[in-house]
Image: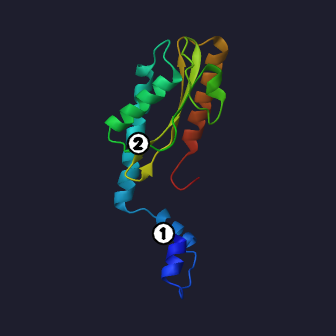
């Protein structure tokens, strides 16, 4: 590493180029943009499949493994971070680690995952509900949908 380099070049002055490299990496060329799109496409395709994977009694770990397998089958080079799957109360815990908890009808589900593709990554979070929703949860769902539609109505390129 660095110590070996200083021994090999005793008269050299070393300068931190991190800020300049970060600026250069911030601008993407066409091939980098394509890799980002591919990572996002893989993740999005898996997100669409998640409802078809849900089975009563499956564990959080089983769903996470199936999602990762499908990302790899679609061309990912792996996951971009540890896949989070939470059922029921676990779905409200940020940065949760899946375990052997089993899916039951009426539970909410959160899946936070990402595909890694040729050094570029995506990060996708999706919430689902398994089975029928009670009236309170249905009202919350409708409120969130209205908020999303209101946000989408004002979005345009160039704003953040």
| Residue 112 percent across, percent down from the top left | 53, 35
Confirm or deny contact between disc 1 and disc 2 (CB under 8 A). Answer: no
* Figure quadrant of residue 14: bottom right
| Residue 67 percent across, percent down from the top left | 43, 30
Task: Tell me the residue at 52%/80% (across/down).
Answer: 7
> Mark 2, residues whose alpha carbon is within 10 Å: few (<14), some, or many (≥20)?
some
In front here: 102 or 91?
102
Task: Tell me the residue at 43%/52% (across/down).
Answer: 120
Question: Which residue, as the protein is rendered here, is positioned at the far bottom?
Answer: 11
Q: Is 104 positioned to the left or the right of 31 in the image? A: right
Q: Is residue 84 above or below residue 90?
A: below
In front here: 150 or 98?
98
Task: Tell me the residue at 38%/58% (across/down).
Answer: 32
Q: Is residue 156 above or below residue 105?
A: below
| Residue 159 percent across, percent down from the top left | 57, 54
Label ID, residue 24: 1
Q: Is residue 48 above or below residue 52?
A: below
Q: Is residue 36 visible?
A: yes
Q: Is 143 positioned to the left or the right of 112 in the image? A: right
Label ID, residue 62: none
What's the colour scheme? rainbow
Whole-angstrom CA distance, mark 1 to mark 2, is 26 Å
Q: Earlier in the sequence, mark 1 or mark 2?
A: 1
Q: Which secondary structure lies at badge 1?
A: helix
In front here: 82 or 34?
82
Label ID, residue 78: 2
| Residue 11 percent across, percent down from the top left | 54, 88
């Amino acid at each position: 590493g660095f110590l070996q380099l200083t021994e090999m070049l005793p008269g050299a002055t070393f300068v931190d180029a991190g800020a300049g490299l970060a600026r250069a990496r911030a601008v993407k060329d066409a091939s980098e943009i394509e890799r980002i799109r591919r990572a996002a496409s893989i993740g999005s395709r898996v997100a669409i499949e998640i409802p078809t994977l849900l089975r009563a009694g499956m564990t959080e770990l089983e769903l996470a493994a199936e999602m990762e397998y499908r990302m790899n089958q679609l061309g990912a080079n792996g996951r971009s971070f540890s896949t989070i799957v939470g059922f029921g109360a676990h779905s409200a815990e940020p940065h949760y680690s899946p375990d052997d908890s089993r899916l039951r009808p009426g539970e909410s589900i959160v899946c936070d995952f990402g595909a890694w593709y040729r050094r570029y990554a995506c990060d996708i979070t999706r919430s689902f509900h398994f089975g029928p929703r009670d009236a309170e949860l249905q009202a919350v769902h409708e409120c969130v949908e209205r908020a999303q539609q209101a946000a989408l109505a004002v979005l345009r390129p160039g704003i953040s």
